[in-house]
Amino acid sequence: MRGCKIIVLDVPLLFEVKMDKWTKPIIVVWVDPETQLRRLMTRDGTTVEEAKSRINSQMSLNLKRTKADIVIDNSGSPEDLNRLFKEVLVRVRKPLTWTEFGLSRDGAIVAFVSILFGVIVCWKSL
């Protein structure tokens, strides 16, 4: 992944497996429960009971929505979703704040090099 500034992870169980603490920003693609059920049944060819069982085995989208930094409403058409995703992509490509930079890999490298430089300078002045 050398040279990549943005990596998109598609992790349906992000919160359940506690990976949310390692990702930023968290983007949840949300849809109302009725549409979610209908789409799942259509996609997988399952019964209402099977689809509900699968949905209920995961954290609800409404709860995931409260934990997200950004929410994409997927109630519309595939074209709407594509447009919304592109808008979010523009948002996440914006420059980082100083806090976000400090918490990033690049920020950690800058901090490490700065500390190492300071130690060397102090050691040579002794």
Image (cartoon, grey):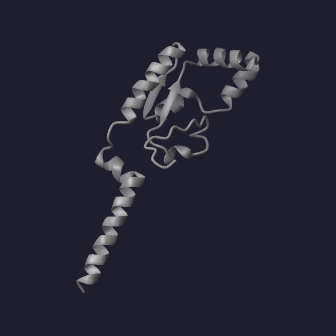
How many marks on residues? 0
**How far across and down, in percent of the image, does residue 83 sit?**
44, 19
**How far across and down, in percent of the image, does residue 121 sit?**
26, 77
Q: Residue furthest left?
A: 125
Q: Residue at x 29, y 49 (%)?
A: 98
Q: Which of the pair 117/53 is nearer the observer? A: 117
Q: Is residue 92 above or below residue 126?
A: above
Q: Is residue 104 above or below residue 31?
A: below
Q: Which of the pair 32/23 is nearer the observer? A: 23
Is 114 positioned to the left or the right of 82 in the image?
left
Q: Residue furthest bottom?
A: 126
Q: Residue at x 48, y 33 (%)?
A: 27
Placement of the C terminus among the 4 image quadrants? bottom left
**How far across and down, in percent of the image, does residue 54 sit?**
70, 27
Q: Residue at x 76, y 22 (%)?
A: 50
Is 29 positioned to the left or the right of 36 in the image?
left
Is 110 positioned to the left or the right of 86 in the image?
left
**How far across and down, in percent of the image, does residue 21 sit?**
50, 47
Q: Which of the pair 101/17 is nearer the observer? A: 101
State the image quarter where residue 14 is shown.
top right
Is 23 positioned to the left or the right of 121 in the image?
right
Q: Is residue 108 above or below residue 94?
A: below
Q: Which of the pair 11/47 is nearer the observer? A: 11
Q: Residue at x 42, y 35 (%)?
A: 69
State the image quarter where residue 95 is shown.
top left
